Amino acid sequence: MNIALSEMQETIKMVQMESLDIRTVTMGISLLDCGDSDFEKMNKRVYDKITSYAKDLKSVAETVEKEYGIPIINKRISITPIAEILGNATKEQAIELAKTLDKAAIKLGVDFIGGYSALVHKGISKGDQTLLDALPEALSVTERVCASVSVATTRTGINMDAVAQMGHIIKDAAERTKDKNGIACAKLVVFCNPVEDNPFMAGAFHGSGEGEVVLNVGVSGPGVVLNALRRYPDADLGQVSEVIKKTAFKITRAGELIGRVVAERLDVPFGIMDLSLAPTNAINDSVAEILEEIGLERVGTHGTIAALALMNDAVKKGGAMASSYVGGLSGAFIPVSEDNGMIKGIVDGALTLSKLEAMTCVCSVGLDMIALTGDVTAATLSAIIADEAAIGMINKKTTAVRVIPIPGKKEGDMVEFGGLLGRAPVMGVNPFSSDKFIRRGGRIPAPLQALIN
């Protein structure tokens, strides 16, 4: 890849003044050869393989970061969905395996390890059920283990039996970590149409279509897009799209350069660039503020979905021109607790849970890092998951739910999660019951693939 001097100068400016960073380099590792009927052997193989492949991940990433002057915020690992190798393991052994993953992540100095996961969108195998049973305790006794569960796809429909279980799992996980504002739920994502090469947590896992080991990269860049737009206050929406597209191109070029250097030094294949705009709590590093710069008085008001659709599409078009291997989720994250603009929108009464649901129809993920009242029922959580899965299923896109019921908190309270997870105002839910709908169980059939109006 040849980089011109002018591109280097622009990149330096984006780093120094506009909060550009590489949000994550994530090493994906296959554990498919670690399964064994003897749990102790499997446990040791998992630990040895992860710590062997990723032993230099942190040090190499930090060296490249210093050499090129572009911050790499997170170094992470994704693994084969653990349910696929559990076999006849017990719930207690599955929890022990989570502790092993945590131990490996701590030893390697990585921020998170993702893939304590199960894919149950069509049915639940024995290993899947063992993992589901272990999830609340596994997430509450570990620090860096992240989990995800796929409950729906466009091709299979929605597994409502799994959806019903997830409501209880989220409630249980929140209660077990009530002294930390239900933090275990911040490490658990429920998916429709998950992708196998997503480098972002908490939903990263190394899917069965992936190779032995690979390095995936996720860029950030809301601050860069925001600053670019501020230079064109009177541009029409076509020109706004063009500005975002060109900016996404530059961000992606910088990200792919760094990712390829890290991959080469680790002697592993470069995987994909995830083009997602990922906000942080830093000032002017907010997706919501981009939407407001486009012309909304406050995110959540009428026009929000149209502005988000414009932005998301422009990011993809610009990024796709800059990289041959685009993957992951690619678009825009709208996590509430990690985005100052989203938090302000809720506090000011402009942004509601219903509007956030509608926004997920046109952006890259779903309901993300949303604090809910502690008295929300398991059935209501399941119904929220079902709604979001239906949006993903019908629209053939990834959607997800990462919500955190906060024990003892009521609507309007503010809770702190700390670090990148930020803080969030507690939101209320619709008071009417969905119990009977969730109790019916079964599987919502896959949609017709034509006549999609």
Image: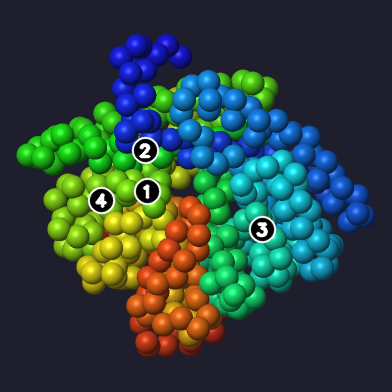
Mark 1 sits on what residue? 282
Quote the CA–CA distance across marks 1 and 4: 12 Å
Residue shown at 23% from the left, 69% from the top: 348
Up-down relation of residue 42 to residue 249 (above or below) = below
* Mark 3 or mark 4, earlier in chain: 3
Looking at the figure, which quarter contains the C terminus? bottom left
Mark 4 sits on what residue? 289
The residue furthest left is 234
Residue shown at 29% from the left, 68% from the top: 346
* Mark 1 or mark 4, earlier in chain: 1
Q: Which mark is residue 19?
A: 2
Amino acid type for the residue under numbered disc 1 = Ala
Quote the CA–CA distance across marks 2 and 1: 8 Å
Mark 3 sits on what residue? 143
Q: Where's residue 46, x and y in %? A: 80, 46
Whether pointer 2 and pointer 1 mark residues with C-beta atoms closer than 8 Å, the reply is yes
Amino acid type for the residue under numbered disc 3 = Glu
Q: Which mark is residue 90?
A: none
